[in-house]
Image (cartoon, helix red, strand yellow):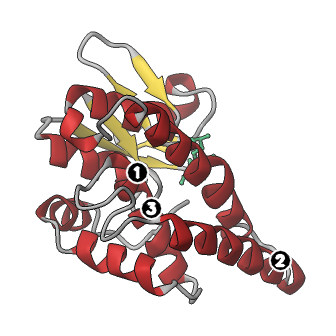
């Protein structure tokens, strides 16, 4: 497998999950502004959407979108998913919320937004973190077991810290606990480059 990534971007969730699953993968960095890969490839020819993550399977099949990439990893290593009859549904419900609500709410921080837009974004992120704070089972989103959704949440809590946003206490506990996992420490060391995102 090969993961196209940008340091500290949402693709970090896939890298953490691959390590958690014990899946050996190659990693190729993408300059998201220039849309060039570290080996000089035209990234838009590889992924027309131009975004990371992109996971290329051993047979050459490409998978885009965080929700799909993370779900694929959990299907390969069910320990990273949620058990029970509605387990996968609950997991996709959470991943979709993280992707379409929380992740999107951070977007103004990445572009040259004005102060009013950043205030609106701060409130939008806070509202979504409050919902998750009320929903987390502790210490992880679904209870004692770490899932792919925790990897995704962790990446966005890192962004929240970097932007000086307030992280509610139960989510902070999830962040601290997740930070200590060896998969996370390995992934952060591998991505120890200045950019947090694009
Ligand atoms: N819909 C995509 C969006 C992923 C996304 O926003 N990735 C960011 C990095 S966190 C990115 O690649 N931004 C640069 C761009 O979209 O051009 C997904 O959920 O995977």
Neighbourhood count class around disc 3 (C-alpha, 10 Å): few under 14, some 14–19, many 20 upward: many
| Residue 141 in which image quadrant | bottom left
110 or 158: nearer the eye? Answer: 158
72 or 55: nearer the eye? Answer: 72
- Residue at the image position 70 percent from the left and 73 percent from the top: 127
Seen in the image, is 41 located left or right of residue 81? right
Q: Quadrant of the C terminus?
A: bottom right
Q: Which residue is mark 1?
A: 149
* Badge 3 residue CB within 8 Å of ligand 1: no
Measure the C-alpha gap from mark 3 to mark 2.
21 Å
Q: Which residue is mark 3?
A: 153
Q: Which residue is mark 2?
A: 120
Give the structural element (helix, strand or loop) at label 3. Answer: helix
Q: N-terminal of the two: label 3 or label 2?
A: 2
Q: Would you say the residues marked 3 and 2 are in contact, meaning their CB atoms lie under 8 Å apart?
A: no
Give the structural element (helix, strand or loop) at label 1. Answer: helix
Neighbourhood count class around disc 2 (C-alpha, 10 Å): few under 14, some 14–19, many 20 upward: few
| Residue 195 in which image quadrant | bottom left
55 or 29: nearer the eye? Answer: 55
Q: N-terminal of the two: label 2 or label 1?
A: 2
Q: Would you say the residues marked 3 and 1 are in contact, meaning their CB atoms lie under 8 Å apart?
A: yes
User: Vertically, is 65 above or below 183?
Assistant: above
């Amino acid at each position: 497998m090969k993961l196209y990534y940008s340091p500290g971007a949402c693709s970090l969730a896939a890298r953490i999950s691959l390590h958690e699953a014990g899946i050996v993968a190659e990693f190729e960095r993408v300059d998201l502004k220039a849309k060039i890969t570290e080996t000089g490839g035209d990234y838009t020819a590889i992924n027309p959407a131009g975004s990371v993550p992109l996971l290329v399977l051993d047979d050459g099949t490409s998978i885009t979108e965080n929700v799909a990439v993370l779900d694929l990893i959990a299907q390969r290593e069910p320990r990273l998913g949620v058990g029970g009859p509605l387990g996968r549904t609950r997991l996709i419900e959470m991943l979709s919320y993280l992707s379409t609500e929380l992740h999107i709410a951070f977007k103004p921080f990445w572009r040259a937004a004005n102060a009013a837009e950043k205030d609106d974004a701060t409130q939008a992120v806070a509202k979504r973190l409050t919902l998750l704070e009320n929903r987390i089972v502790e210490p992880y989103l679904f209870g004692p077991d770490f899932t792919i959704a925790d990897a995704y949440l962790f990446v966005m809590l890192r962004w929240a810290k970097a932007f000086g946003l307030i992280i509610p206490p139960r989510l902070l506990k999830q962040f601290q606990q997740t930070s200590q996992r060896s998969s996370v420490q390995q992934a952060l060391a591998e991505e120890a480059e200045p950019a947090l995102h694009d």
